[in-house]
């Protein structure tokens, strides 16, 4: 009986995750580039202060202005990543800052799209490499280790500083008992 219930629950989750999700509501557009820059800086400050969920509406409004730079899309992608993992205390119980798993998965998916937008807009190879490295970090957090290796290799091709971390990750994938995150944490400072 328990096996049937578990299988049905798993099937329901799989069907729910595969269904098309509605697009996020359009954000109220900023008046112009100056206001968009101010909103981006406010959102960035909130995200850096570990209030990623609160930063999301500010980033959305800033990005609604045409011509947003790669850095704005990268900041939004990182805020989405952090929002998916952000905790909050409610009635003395530590919970997710987002309502539930579907919202966390949606934030992670939207973050991956924003990484793509940022990479498409970035013009300098070191900037594109940094975007690949952050995308790799996100992939690691979500357990997509081989995707992370691919992203670190892409970063390495554009900026050799990421070679060590790509080689280290390749070693981890072959010898998981030797995991040490020191280099990862030192390389990916915001």
Image (cartoon, rainbow, N blue to C red):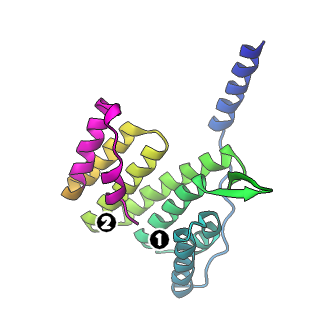
- Quarter of the image for residue 70 reads bottom left
Residue situated in front as seen by the camera: 162 or 186: 186
Query: Where 29 sits versus 109, above or below?
Result: below
Give the Cα separation between the discs numbered 2 and 1: 12 Å
* Horizontal side of residue 73 vs 122, given as left or right: right
Question: Which residue is the extreme one toward the right?
Answer: 91
Question: Is residue 104 shown in magenta?
Answer: no
Q: Which residue is mark 1?
A: 72
Residue 18 drawn at (x, y percent): 62, 35
Q: Which residue is mark 2?
A: 127
- Residue at 49%, 43% in the rendered image: 142
Residue 124 drawn at (x, y percent): 27, 68
**Bounds of the magenta segment:** 162-190
* Horizontal side of residue 129 vs 108, given as left or right: left
Badge 1 element = helix
Q: Earlier in the sequence, mark 2 or mark 1?
A: 1
- Residue at 42%, 56% in the rendered image: 116
Q: Work out whether residue 65 can be spotted.
A: no
Residue 133 drawn at (x, y percent): 34, 55
Quarter containing the C terminus = bottom left
Q: Main secondary structure of the magenta part?
A: helix
């Amino acid at each position: 009986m328990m096996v049937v219930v578990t299988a049905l629950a798993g099937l329901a989750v799989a069907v729910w995750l595969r269904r098309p999700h509605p697009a996020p509501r359009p954000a109220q557009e900023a008046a112009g580039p100056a206001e968009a820059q101010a909103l981006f800086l406010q959102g960035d400050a909130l995200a850096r202060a570990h209030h990623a969920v609160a930063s999301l509406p500010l980033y959305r409004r800033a990005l609604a202005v045409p011509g947003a730079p790669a850095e704005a899309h990268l900041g939004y992608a990182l805020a989405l990543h952090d929002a998916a993992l952000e905790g909050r205390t409610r009635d003395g119980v530590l919970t997710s800052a987002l309502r539930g798993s579907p919202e966390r998965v949606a934030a992670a998916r939207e973050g991956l799209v924003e990484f793509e937008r940022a990479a498409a807009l970035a013009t300098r190879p070191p900037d594109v490499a940094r975007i690949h490295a952050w995308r790799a970090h996100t992939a690691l957090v979500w357990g997509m280790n081989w995707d992370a290796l691919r992203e670190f290799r892409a970063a390495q091709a554009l900026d050799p500083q990421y070679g060590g971390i790509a080689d280290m990750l390749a070693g981890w994938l072959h010898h998981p008992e030797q995991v040490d995150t020191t280099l990862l944490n030192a390389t990916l400072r915001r």
